[in-house]
């Protein structure tokens, strides 16, 4: 699976439930994992099937998490960054790219998270991998809970109306 945005595929989860994916891919779910002594985590198979055989891990913007992009999505991010004019656009591109790493899961599905990225996201033993639409995110579970607890959908009535949720 190469992670393209216009794929059509049937996914079967561990319970045998099939999900039909068509059009925009949406990564979803939460997966608890442990960081081993070498800085590796088992990246969820369900997300690997969608995101592809290799992918990019970069610092998340605005919060202390790591963003995980398919190679195709990473190229889209790069194109968007290159289109930003001026020093602010250059600084953001430099910040994102300097902290990014291409990763390929090993035969056990583990990925190595480089030390500077682990430090940035404050990753310790426990790690939470969450699907976040067009990307996945890797979080320190304590920081994720703080963010999750602080979010209230009722604070966004216009968005909820627009989405008809």
Image: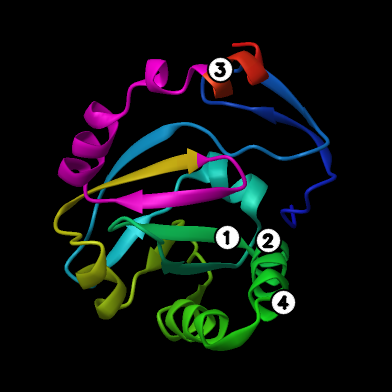
Task: Say which quarter of the image contains residue 85.
Answer: bottom right
Which residue is located at x 47 percent, y 85 percent? Answer: 91
Dot in front, 1 or 3: 3
From the viewer's perspective, is 62 left or right of 149?
A: right
Q: Which residue is mark 3?
A: 160
Is residue 55 toward the left or the right of residue 136 in the image?
A: right
Q: Residues within 10 Å of mark 3 (few under 14, many from 20)?
A: few
| Corner quadrant of residue 162 | top right
Q: Which of disc 1 and disc 4 is earlier in sequence?
A: 1
How many numbered circles are shown? 4
Q: Are marks 2 and 1 in contact (CB under 8 Å)?
A: yes
Residue 53 falls left or right of residue 145: right
Q: Where does label 2 land, which residue?
A: 73
Label 4 to label 1: alpha-carbon separation: 19 Å
Label 3 residue SS: helix
Q: Is residue 58 magenta?
A: no
Q: Earlier in the sequence, mark 1 or mark 3?
A: 1
Q: CA distance from mark 4 to mark 2?
A: 15 Å
Residue 147's place in the image compared with 114, above or below, is above
Select label 4 or label 1 by which is in front.
4
Q: Which mark is residue 69?
A: 1
Q: Which residue is mark 4?
A: 83
**Residue at the spot 57% in from the left edge and 50% down from the top edge:** 48
- Magenta segment: 132-157
Q: Nearer the viewer, residue 117 or 103?
A: 117
| Residue 153 image position (x, y, % from top left) | 41, 20
Q: Is the residue 76 above or below the residue 14 in the image?
A: below
In the rendered structure, the answer to whether residue 146 lies left or right of residue 159 reads left
């Amino acid at each position: 699976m190469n992670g393209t945005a216009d794929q059509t595929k049937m996914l079967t989860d561990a319970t045998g439930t099939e999900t039909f994916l068509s059009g925009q891919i949406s990564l979803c779910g939460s997966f608890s994992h442990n960081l081993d002594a070498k800085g590796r985590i088992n990246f969820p198979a369900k997300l690997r099937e969608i995101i592809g055989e290799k992918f990019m891990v970069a610092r998340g913007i605005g919060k202390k998490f790591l963003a995980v992009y398919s190679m195709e999505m990473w190229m889209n991010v790069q194109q968007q960054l290159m289109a930003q004019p001026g020093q602010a656009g250059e600084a953001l591109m430099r910040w994102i790219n300097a902290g990014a790493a291409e990763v390929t899961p090993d035969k056990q599905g583990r990925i190595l998270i480089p030390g500077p990225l682990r430090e940035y996201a404050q990753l310790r033993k426990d790690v939470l991998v969450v699907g976040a639409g067009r990307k996945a995110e890797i979080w320190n579970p304590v920081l994720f809970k703080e963010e999750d607890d602080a979010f209230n959908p009722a604070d966004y009535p216009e968005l909820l109306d627009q989405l008809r949720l």
